[in-house]
Image (cartoon, helix red, strand yellow):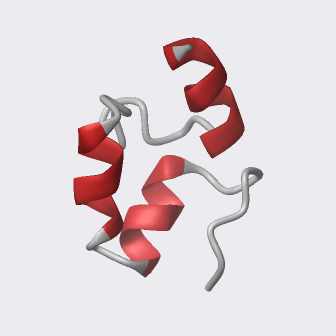
Amino acid sequence: MPATTDRTLADLVTADPGAARVLERFDLDYCCGGGRRLDEACAAAG
């Protein structure tokens, strides 16, 4: 499943648990902030 920006962080990690390491590297919270879309989380992180 491709990682598109309109998917939530939780969806990405559910589909591919290895994505958690990538998100953690960029300080993107996929647990409590898992409802955010990838594009929203990236924009907020700067």
At horizontal 65% and vertical 78% (from top left) the residue drawn is 2
Q: How many marks?
A: 0
Name the residue at 53% across, 39% down.
35
Foreground residue among 40 and 31: 40
**Residue at 49 percent of width and 64 percent of height:** 12
| Residue 15: image location, x then y, percent | 45, 79
Please tell me whether residue 32 is drawn above or below residue 22 in the rendered image.
Answer: above
Q: Position of residue 41 (x, y in %)?
A: 56, 29
Residue 10 place in picture, x, y as percent: 44, 54
* Horizontal side, residue 23 vs residue 25: left or right: right
**In front here: 24 or 7?**
24
Which image quarter is the C terminus in? top right
Residue 36 position within the rendered picture, expressed as x and y whole percent measured from the top left: 58, 35
Which residue is at the far bottom?
Answer: 1
Q: Quadrant of residue 40?
A: top right
Q: What residue is shown at x 38% (from left), y 65% (from top)?
A: 13
Q: 25 or 35: nearer the eye?
A: 25
Residue 18 found in image quarter: bottom left
Tell me if residue 46 comes above or below residue 21 in the rendering.
Answer: above
Seen in the image, is 22 located left or right of residue 12?
left
- Residue 27 quadrant: top left
Quarter in which the N terminus is drawn: bottom right
